[in-house]
Amino acid sequence: MKEGFVSCRLDSDSWIARRLVESRTLGNDGRGFTLIELMVAIAVLALLVALVAQLTNNVTKIVKISDQRMDSESEAQLVFSRMAEDIEARDRRPDADCFFVKNTGNDAFYFYSQASGYHPDTTDEGPPSLFSFVGYRISNRAAPTTVAPNGQLERVGVGMGYDNANQTGKIMKLLSYSTLPTVAVPNPPPIPQSTIAYSQGSLGNPVDGNEIGTSPTWDNPPYEEANQAVLSSRVFRLEFYFILNDGTYFVPGAPGSTPWGVAGADAPFMDDMTTIKTKAVAMVVTIALLDQNSQLIVPQSAPNMPNFSTAIAALADVNITPSTHVAASTVTSPAATWENTVQSALASPATCMATLGMPPAAATQIRVYQRTIPFKP
């Protein structure tokens, strides 16, 4: 009896051990995972991986777009800050010439300012003065290169010297006149040699090079590289207009080939410059930017040179009749006009290429900024 009892207990223990092993390895019901269960588990896992990957990709795109926008905003802030400093320090004397050029497309403007500038030849110009010849333009070279391409915002900054005996070098010339004002001719044309167009441009014989170019755009000089700097390689469009002290808006007429007019007659362009110097209380500047990565997919006019001609033409000039005081209520902000143009062009890839000359992937990255820069009295 005793031996049989022991044998029964051992058999019972062996059976229990086997059941414990089976329950741990096969589950409580004694079964394993079926093929369908494994396939469903793999499918769910693959779906989760795809969702996480899509979420990560979307976050990456959002971060990239945000970074590009922040970079563009920083670039615009740099441009406007530099312009504001130069304009704030401009020479406000009535006999200090200025040269604001309204073009179909990109504008250009030049003036004398107590701002920083490069002094190319102190021997020729004499002791350096506090003034510099300052200007802003979108580069428009006749023969652009990869080192000096077109379609970027440049700042001209040439240090002026004090007047010297031989009247050569980079000297600030004040406007002078051969005739006195009369009722019939309230603003007689100045002596050409005293104007910016002559002393700093192609109409004269400036010792250190033509800084403002030739008629009609006055933004295409042979470019003395030492006297200029690329302020922004992203800015491809530049527009301005003025707010006058009577609340109206104003843009000057075209300078023409002789900006000071015909001797003995009234000079419309010089009249406009006088209006700006005596009545303008602020200058509104609008710029359009495109980041470097997006510029790579814009059709090229030459190797590594995006062709912005179509986009420049599409972003319309401000709707102000030149040389006319226009009510503010009739003027549409260039920034609003440009943004609407870009949004309309994004209707389809074909429309985008026809309107802006670039694919939608680039056009969506165009950023437009506008700033009102006050004129100190």
Image (tube, rainbow, N blue to C red):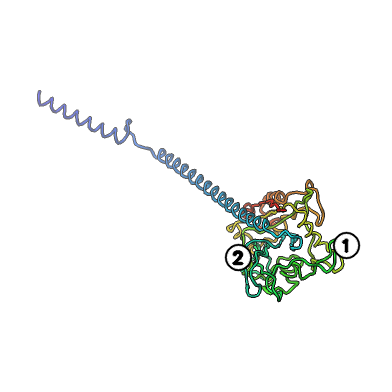
* Mark 2, secondary structure of its residue: loop
CA neighbours of label 2 inside 10 A, class few (<14), some (14 to 19), many (20+): some
State whether residue 53 appears in this view: yes
- What x and y, as percent, mark residue 221? 69, 69
- What x and y, as percent, mark residue 100? 74, 60
Q: For the view shown, which residue lies furthest in the bottom direction?
A: 166
Placement of the N terminus among the 4 image quadrants: top left
Q: Nearer the viewer, residue 273 or 23?
A: 273
Circles 1 and 2, Cβ within 8 Å, touching? The answer is no
Q: Nearer the viewer, residue 346 or 192?
A: 192
State whether residue 137 appears in this view: no
What residue is shown with label 2?
Answer: 304
* Mark 1, secondary structure of its residue: loop
Disc 1 marks a residue whose amino acid type is: Thr
Residue 252's disc number: none
Disc 2 marks a residue whose amino acid type is: Asn
Image height of 152 relative to 164, above or below: above
Image height of 139 relative to 368, above or below: below
Q: Nearer the viewer, mark 1 or mark 2?
A: 1
What residue is shown with label 1?
Answer: 182
- What x and y, as percent, mark residue 285? 70, 54
- Name the residue rendered at 38%, 38% in the picture: 34
- Name the residue rendered at 74%, 65% in the picture: 217
Q: Quadrant of residue 91?
A: bottom right
CA–CA distance in space, label 1 to label 2: 55 Å
- What x and y, as percent, mark residue 225? 63, 69
